[in-house]
Amino acid sequence: MSGRRRTFHTVISYVTGDATHPHGQGPKIIGHVCNDTGGWGRGFVLALSRRWPQPEADYRAWHRSGNDFQLGAIRLVQVEPELWVANMIGQHGIRPTKDGPPIRYDALDRCLSALGDEALSLHASVHMPRIGAGLAGGSWEQIEPLILKQLTERGIAVTVYDLP
């Protein structure tokens, strides 16, 4: 790891604030859940788009290309010198169906695993709202253990932001 030791984290830091303004020093990745339909226009993505045009533009281009645009896939988009946004496809469709909410926990688990690989490679901390628990309809009680397993247990600092 190029001589840098990673502090071992086993908990998620919860703070009140805006995940588009992540706290702390060093490289950071803002993670969020996207759907697999190419739709961008409600929820946390609006805050991202107000701040930077690149995550939405990349997501739309990725959807059009069809290149690995599927549940469980992620793409990192650099928005500032030491800041990336991770577009993570962990939601099938945009509305609940008879089968349940749009969140797909298995896909989110794969996304978080890939996010962990990227964070380790960049020596980055991860910042996010309560991903998958808003419009995707997921249960934070099911999502939090995935974050612990794929990120904090691998030594990656994670901060979750709740709006005031």
Image (spheres, rainbow, N blue to C red):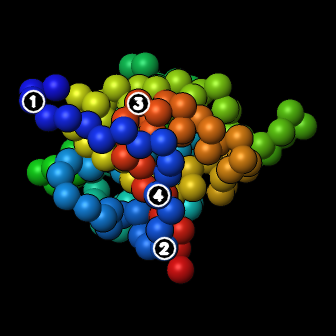
The image's mark for residue 3 is 1
**What is the x, y in percent for residue 69?**
46, 25
Q: What residue lies at 53% left-to-right and 80% top-to-bottom?
A: 164
Q: Are marks 4 and 2 in contact (CB under 8 Å)?
A: no
**Nearest to N terminus: mark 4 or mark 3:** 4
The image's mark for residue 16 is 2
Element marked by disc 4: strand
Element marked by disc 3: helix
**164 with respect to 75 (left or right):** right
**Nearest to N terminus: mark 1 or mark 3:** 1
Q: What residue lies at 72% left-to-right and 47% top-to-bottom?
A: 141
Cα distance in 3D space between marks 1 and 3:
17 Å
Give neighbour class at mark 4: few <14, some 14-19, many 20+ (Cα, 10 Å).
few
What residue is disc 4 on?
13
The quadrant where residue 65 appears:
top left
What residue is disc 3 on?
154
The quadrant where residue 59 appears:
top left
